[in-house]
Image (cartoon, grey):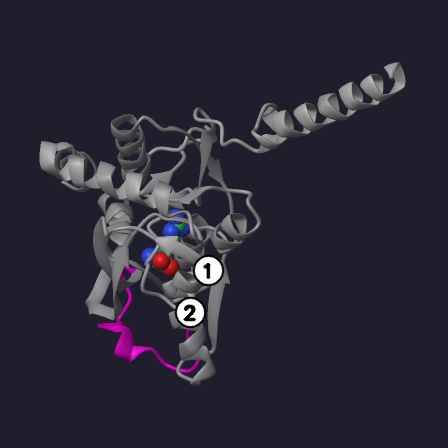
């Protein structure tokens, strides 16, 4: 009799232990931690959206202030991680990041197939930036011996590479950092930089003596949006709610005045 009782007790103990673990009785159940710090990935040579200054690693800009305001509104913890622009979407795909905030055009290419983009927070077009003494008057004036620079993986980068493919310029020089493009323009290594209008304007604010815009905006009209990992609807809804609240309570307009006036 005793042996049967012991076997029954052992069986009941094992069933109870299994039931406990299956109901999330331990942290290994994969329960999402409420206070996880979300990784916002960006490429910080894109002033005034995201940039660093004088060797300081701190990332500043409109996108930084916007994401911090959204995070505060929605009770999220975020941190910013700086990386090359064409690494941003792969970072989400490989769970090396949770959110992209990088002045990224949600309408471009196959981006929306690889990440889920939120509501538009800024609109833009491309412009041609040239040296002050350039005789170019628009993007349509470029000639087959010219070189134009832009950033790798961006709409501007794609544009200059398409001009090269079409034989309209000698080379579309795609670089990792916008600052390198500006430097190559000033060194005379390239005859122009294809850049997002608000970013070129920020550069001209500080360098109007050595550079200028020529011609009208061109390329596909852009809608900048943050992005989350494919399928993370819960987080995207929170970001969109935070943006809506920012626009409602005046914070968005304050940030536009701060960074674009
Ligand atoms: N708006 C352009 C694009 O979506 C350029 C974005 C570059 N952003 C940056 N943080 N470097 O391709």
Work out whether residue 100 or residue 3 is closer to the camera in this orientation and state it: 3
Give the left or right position of residue 113, taking residue 91 as reference. Answer: left
- Is residue 83 part of the magenta span, yes or no? no
Which of discs 1 and 2 lies nearer the camera? The answer is 1
Residue 31, which numbered label? none
Across and down, in percent, residue 167 comes to: 44, 85
Across and down, in percent, residue 184 comes to: 45, 57
In which of the image's four quarters is ligand 1 placed? Answer: bottom left
Q: Name the dominant secondary structure of the magenta segment.
A: loop
Label 1 – label 2 distance at C-alpha: 18 Å
Instruction: Give the residue at mark 2.
Output: 158
- Residue 165, relative to residue 194: is it above or below? below
- Placement of the C terminus among the 4 image quadrants: top left
Across and down, in percent, residue 56 comes to: 45, 28
Instruction: Give the residue at mark 1.
Output: 114
Please rate how many residues cluster around mark 1, counting C-alpha atoms within 10 Å: few if below 14, some from 14 to 19, many from 20: some
* The CB of the residue at mark 2 lies under 8 Å from ligand 1: yes
Give the left or right position of residue 62, taking residue 38 as reference. Answer: left
Secondary structure state at the residue bearing disc 1: helix
Give the left or right position of residue 10, taking residue 120 as reference. Answer: right
Q: Which residues are magenta?
A: 131-148
Across and down, in percent, residue 88 comes to: 48, 50
Label whose residue precedes the other's in the sequence (1 or 2): 1
- Is residue 142 part of the magenta span, yes or no? yes
């Amino acid at each position: 009799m005793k042996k049967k009782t012991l076997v029954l007790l052992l069986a009941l103990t094992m069933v109870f232990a299994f039931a406990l673990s299956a109901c999330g009785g331990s942290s290994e159940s994969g329960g999402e931690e409420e206070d996880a710090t979300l990784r916002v990935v960006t490429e910080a040579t894109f002033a005034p959206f995201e940039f660093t200054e004088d060797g300081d690693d701190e990332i500043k800009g409109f996108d930084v202030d916007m994401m911090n305001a959204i995070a505060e509104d929605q009770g999220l913890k975020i941190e910013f991680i700086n990386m090359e622009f064409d690494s941003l979407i792969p970072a989400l795909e490989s769970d090396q990041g949770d959110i992209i905030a990088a002045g990224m055009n949600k309408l471009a290419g196959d981006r929306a197939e690889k990440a889920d983009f939120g509501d538009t927070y800024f609109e833009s077009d491309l412009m041609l930036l040239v040296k002050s003494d350039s005789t170019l008057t628009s993007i349509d004036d470029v000639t087959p011996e010219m070189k134009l620079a832009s950033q790798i993986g961006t709409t501007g980068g794609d544009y200059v590479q398409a001009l090269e493919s079409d034989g309209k310029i000698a080379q579309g020089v795609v670089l990792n950092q916008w600052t390198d493009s500006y430097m190559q323009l000033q060194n005379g290594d390239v005859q122009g930089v294809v850049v997002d209008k608000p970013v070129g304007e920020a550069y001209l604010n500080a360098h109007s003596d050595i550079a200028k815009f020529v011609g009208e905006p061109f390329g596909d009209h852009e809608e900048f949006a943050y992005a989350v990992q494919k399928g993370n609807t819960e987080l995207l809804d929170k970001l969109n709610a935070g943006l809506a609240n920012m626009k409602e309570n005046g914070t968005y307009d304050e940030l536009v005045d701060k960074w674009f006036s």
